[in-house]
Image (cartoon, grey):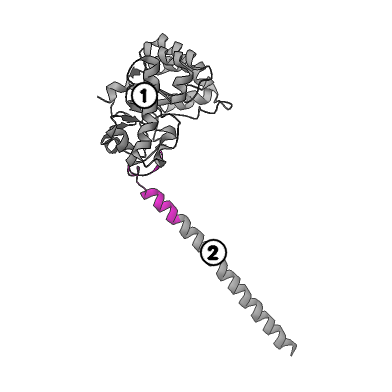
């Protein structure tokens, strides 16, 4: 009897052990199969997504001195009069600044640009024009282009109505003309890089050329500015022929390093063009 009970409990333990082992094997197998599938998907994922994809403008950097892979190719964007870089071996840089508000750094940036005889494009929102008319006048007088960054800086990809889309742009045009007495150059940069194919088509129908970027870095947090070393690591390491560079004029770091940055870019053999030349 004792031997019978011993064998019975041994069989039950053995069965329980086998069941637990089977579950563990299935779990581990599922994990590795899932991991392998994810790796395969990553390897076959296309380097760019259709231009019609909605969301944020995105870049994937391939190597030093090489243009990044973007959400859309240059060819896909061109049908909408849109650009993110120039396909060229010429070491040309197109320098742009986004200006949502003023915190005292733009005068120093303008001083440095004047010193180096570099012309930039400032993409400004409507309230910036109204709050800083003297800076807008100075940008224009010194040969820079003032572009359209919308009036309220909304997520334009969520605006389906062409009337509403147009108003975000034309209100900026009106403010600019009131301050300068001139027609605004129809260059447009989507706030936060949020876009879709419909937006790009709307901008084109309004006579605008849309400009994304091929080089930027995290410089927009006013109270968490990058160090000089962090800035140079990105702005020197990722520069490439035909780059459209996006900087924020609110950045204290940008104001402090711009003189040295332009000098270093020139030492690397780069020169500066204007977006009007790229969009000819």
Outermost bottom residue? 1
Label 2 close to label 1 by CB (< 8 Å): no
Taking depth in this image into account, of 227 and 279 the one nearest to the observer is 279
Outermost right residue? 2
N-term mark: 2 or 1: 2
> Residue beneath label 1, please?
173
> Residue beneath label 2, please?
27
Tell me the element at label 2: helix
Q: Position of residue 163 (x, y in %)?
A: 35, 37
* Residue 138 quadrant: top left
Q: Eyeballing the image, is 164 above or below 278?
A: below
Q: Residue drawn 32% across and 25% down?
A: 186
Instruction: Magenta stretch: give its range.
Output: 36-56
C-alpha separation, residue under disc 2 versus residue under disc 1: 61 Å
* Residue 155 quadrant: top left
Q: Residue drawn 44% across and 20% down?
A: 129
Q: Is residue 54 magenta?
A: yes
Which quadrant: the C terminus? top left
Taking depth in this image into account, of 37 and 12 the one nearest to the observer is 37
- Mark 1, residues whose alpha carbon is within 10 Å: few (<14), some, or many (≥20)? many
Tell me the element at label 1: helix
Q: Is residue 116 magenta?
A: no
Select label 2 or label 1 by which is in front.
1
Q: Eyeballing the image, is 101 above or below 139?
A: below
Which quadrant: the N terminus? bottom right
Asked if residue 10 lies left or right of residue 225, the reply is right
- Mark 2, residues whose alpha carbon is within 10 Å: few (<14), some, or many (≥20)? few
């Amino acid at each position: 009897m004792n031997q019978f009970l011993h064998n019975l409990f041994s069989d039950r333990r053995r069965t329980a052990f086998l069941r637990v082992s089977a579950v563990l094997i299935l779990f581990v197998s599922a994990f590795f199969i899932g991991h392998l599938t994810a790796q395969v998907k990553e390897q076959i994922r296309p380097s760019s997504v259709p231009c019609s994809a909605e969301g944020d403008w995105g870049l994937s950097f391939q190597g030093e001195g090489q243009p990044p892979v973007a959400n859309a190719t240059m060819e896909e964007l061109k049908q909408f009069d849109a650009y993110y870089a120039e396909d060229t071996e010429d070491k040309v840089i197109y320098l742009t600044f986004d200006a949502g508000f003023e915190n005292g750094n733009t005068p120093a940036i303008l001083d440095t640009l004047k010193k180096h005889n570099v012309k930039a494009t400032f993409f400004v929102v409507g309230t910036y024009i109204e709050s800083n008319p003297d800076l807008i006048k100075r940008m224009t007088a010194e040969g820079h282009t003032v572009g359209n960054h919308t009036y309220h800086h909304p997520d334009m990809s969520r605006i389906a109505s062409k009337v509403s889309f147009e108003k975000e742009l034309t209100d900026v045009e009106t403010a600019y003309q009131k301050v300068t007495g001139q027609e605004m150059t129809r260059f447009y940069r989507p706030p936060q890089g949020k876009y879709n194919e419909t937006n790009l088509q709307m901008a084109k129908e309004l006579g605008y050329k849309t400009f994304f970027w091929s080089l930027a870095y995290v410089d927009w947090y006013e109270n968490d500015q990058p160090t000089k070393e962090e800035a140079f690591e990105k702005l020197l390491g990722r520069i490439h022929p035909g780059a459209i560079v996006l900087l924020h004029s609110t950045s204290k770091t940008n104001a402090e390093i711009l003189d040295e940055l332009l000098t270093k870019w020139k030492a690397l053999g780069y020169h500066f063009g204007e977006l009007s030349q790229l969009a000819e």
